[in-house]
Image (cartoon, coloured by chain):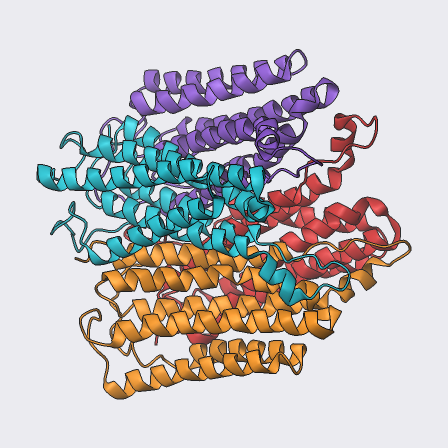
Chain colours: A orange, B cyan, C purple, D red
């Protein structure tokens, strides 16, 4: 098999992720001014748009980072991996939608805010599940990887995925209590992943980097 | 000739496909709430948007997959191939439009729903025809391919294209009877292609993968 | 100098062109139905949107093709080339705007249709001038090219550019007489370029293609 | 570490920058005509949209250029660089938003115009700070660069960054006096950078260009 090369799978995924992350901005609309309203006030009033942009940007950015790290280890692409990757992109590409819903309805309070936060956390949870499935498939044998990392390392990485899923599920549950808290939890998760990614070498790729490798 | 390299043709096509698939999300708008309406209800009510996103995402994803598989076999690009490829991208790049029409009018029922479904199936049929023409051109001699696969393999792949065309034509006809059924048929077709692609090695590329090949 | 590699200049330009060509679709909106209006009728009524999509898609597609062909010959990137290329992308990236204006106002007739057609032709003329300037700079010495093609070939290619400029200027003038004719002329020009590109090997690149060249 | 390759970091950044620069156009909307209004007049009336498109296009174009030049020198990617790069993309990806605010409110005059200009200058200032932080990190040791350039060259490049920050801060302050002047200052800054980039070889990369280097 192996007819879809890793590099082109990465390139297509990179494209979708770069576009999804950049499309987030078009959900932030210039405010319409009511009679006598100050623009500065109207701009402040749509703070949920900025907060949602920030959290979603970080989240997609971290997905890109994780995706890249995993695929530097992948040597072969099989059918299920293709479908699982498309499935991940399907959820990630959807993120601008709940982002827009949160931006529009968070300040409404009540049912609207709670539902918006639940939708947002729910889509992130689904994205996390899709990523976890891809990761589980990639690491379930040494058929796809250049070399299966030590079991302890795989276990640690799986645990890290689990933490994300639990946190997103908690944010989903928290939505019914407090929409802003649920979103803040999603934001903290993205921040944690971003700094974790930046500071800790991911267990899976100790010395496997080939200088001649290219991934567009 | 051969002045447009395969890799850059692939890169441009990948770009257009990645953008088209990601643009689908901006057709899903946050619902506007009427007086006293619950957001959860309003979100449910726009289920045709989600269904259309899903079907179109799968369809463009499968087009990307097929495109990539065919071009791993292509060694030379000639003039007609350039035009045929641009023609395919023209129809694929249009898909977000019928997707938005379906999302907006499927629930209207009656003429509007039927017309929306017919437009949707019609654009997919045209996309399929454009892809079939490209495929027929690529395989009509061994001038463009690294090596012409056995006739039986080409015949099987052409048959597979034919099945798609027949199904999309059937969906177009079915639109006048039932718009949701027509869309469901398009969705089944995309699912079939996705899993077929994922499980069956495409006949055209048995062992031709060159490890040094790159396609951005 | 030469610190911006040709490949990355090409990659960035490819990205902008692929996005501009794909963004065209979001200017085609699902029609809003008036009381008792049939969707089929409303879809037909916005034929200027489809015509404008077609012409602009072909035009940007041909720009991409020409851009690629020229840059397969370019071996060095200097400062003016960077600015001239950015200038070309600035006008090409603008094309979705006049496309939307034409789509919205062509059927209005009168001053609105004429102005829309004039804006459209004017932006294509400016794009052509920007491309001509880039081409003139690239071919004015052999400093940037792998090898300066024979003067006759360069002259022929410059002539070809001139024809385009004259035709777009004619379309601009024609706008005041008939908006649809002006657009049809722009469409014919794009069709001519597309088939010309596809059938005639561009004079500049006879055998210069290096198999190891890559351009993402 | 070094598990994220320079090329893929560049590719992702290129994608985001190319998309952000191309998305600018969708903020220029076809004007809605009031009763009896001429389209030509309505098109002229939205000149702030064109001015804002021009300035933002140049600004993002120059960011791309600078980004590329710096990364041709970078040999290793570490954690802080990843976060700092994502931070730069976060601000750059936001630019279409203040661009749209300026396009919509510059002609309002008064508080709205001043606030719009302040928002615009402020986002450019934040982008400049983000870029400056990335640059400072890259040049603070020779760990990430192929070779640390002479201190004088680094100092000159840092000074250049400083000039930008001071000018954007001045534009921010000027917003309260005159919104159009503040924007003009931002435009001049982008023009200066564009021609400066084009004419002066950046000090950091004298002869370091490797012909085999690729960056998609």
- Residue at 57 percent across and 69 percent down: it is A119
Q: Nearer the viewer, residue D207 or A77?
A: A77
Q: Is residue B207 left or right of residue A16?
A: left
The quarter holding residue A213 reads bottom left
Residue furthest bottom as drawn: A152
Residue D68 against residue B8 in the figure, above or below = below
The quarter holding residue A4 reads bottom left
Observer able to see residue D156? no
Residue A216 against residue C147 in the figure, above or below = below
Percent coordinates x, y for residue B102 in the rendering:
53, 45
Percent coordinates x, y for residue B206 in the rendering:
12, 50
Percent coordinates x, y for residue A14 in the rendering:
40, 58
Percent coordinates x, y for residue A210 in the rendering:
24, 67
Q: Nearer the viewer, residue D154 or D12?
A: D12
Q: Quadrant of the N terminus of chain D?
A: bottom left
- Residue at 90 percent across and 53 percent down: it is A35
């Amino acid at each position: 098999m192996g007819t879809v090369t890793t590099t082109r799978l990465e390139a297509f995924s990179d494209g979708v992720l770069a576009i999804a992350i950049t499309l987030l901005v078009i959900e932030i609309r210039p405010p319409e001014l009511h009679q006598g309203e100050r623009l500065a006030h109207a701009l402040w009033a749509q703070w949920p748009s900025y907060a949602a942009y920030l959290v979603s940007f970080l989240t997609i950015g971290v997905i890109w980072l994780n995706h890249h790290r995993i695929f530097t280890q992948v040597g072969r692409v099989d059918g299920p991996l293709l479908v699982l990757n498309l499935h991940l992109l399907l959820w990630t590409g959807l993120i601008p939608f709940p982002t827009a819903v949160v931006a529009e309805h968070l300040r409404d309070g009540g049912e609207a805010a709670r539902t918006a936060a639940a939708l947002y956390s729910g889509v992130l949870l689904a994205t996390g599940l899709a990523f976890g499935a891809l990761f589980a498939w990639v690491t379930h044998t040494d058929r796809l990887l250049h070399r299966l990392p030590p079991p302890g390392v795989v276990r640690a990485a799986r645990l890290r995925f689990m933490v994300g899923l639990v946190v997103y599920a908690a944010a989903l549950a928290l939505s019914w209590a407090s929409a802003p808290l649920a979103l803040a939890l999603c934001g903290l998760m993205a921040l944690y992943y971003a700094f974790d990614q930046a500071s800790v070498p991911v267990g899976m790729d100790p010395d496997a980097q080939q200088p001649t490798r290219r991934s567009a």
